[in-house]
Amino acid sequence: MKTVAFIPVRGGSKSIPGKNILPFNGKPLLYWTAKAAQDCPEISEIVVATDSEEIAHIAQGLGLTKVVVFWRSAENANDKASTESVMLEYLEKSSLQSNDRFILIQATNPFLQTKHLQDGIEKLNAQPQGSVISCATFKRFRSEEHTSELQSRFGISY
């Protein structure tokens, strides 16, 4: 059985251009999720799905032996393309078998740890449904009082 970690990284981000390769703690943002996958013994391949020469070059230069680049189509790299569409494109073109595992990882989650991936794989192995999704509860303070406190203490503004 093969386990593939799939990281979609589009080149044409409009909100923050190049966000997935901008430095975060001294490394491209993409590095942190790819490194968590690299260190997971259950993961055999890390697929970086991109349409960008620059992103492909950076992905291949991360020093991670499991990383391969998948060239996504222009149709699946535009602003309206969904993550699901590029996943399906890859699955249609790959040689994955029905008993192989496919893990979607978002490059914008630099706090992902190898243990999180291992825990997810263990949960997947322990249940018959065939899929697992991770999520976290997040509470945002939007009151004037909290906003001004965050601004004064941490320089955060909304």
Image (tube, grey):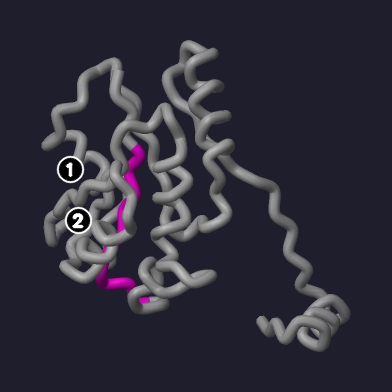
Expressed as whole percent of the image width and height from the top left, the position of residue 123 reads: 55, 22
Q: Tell me whether circle 1 and circle 2 mark residues in contact (CB < 8 Å).
A: yes
* Quadrant in the picture for residue 44: top left
Earlier along the polypeptide chain: callout 1 or callout 2? 2
Q: Is residue 1 above or below residue 88?
A: above
Q: Is residue 129 left or right of residue 91?
A: right
Residue 88: x %, y % from top left:
22, 39
Residue type at mark 1 is Glu
Which residue is located at x 48 percent, y 16 percent? Answer: 125
In this figure, which residue is indicated by the disc labeled 2? Answer: 76
Quadrant, the N terminus = top left
Label at residue 40: none
Q: Position of residue 68 (x, y in %)?
A: 22, 47
Q: Position of residue 76 (x, y in %)?
A: 19, 56
Secondary structure at numbered mark 2:
loop
Q: Which residue is mark 1?
A: 89
- What's under tag 2, amino acid-wise? Asn
Magenta residues (range): 5-14
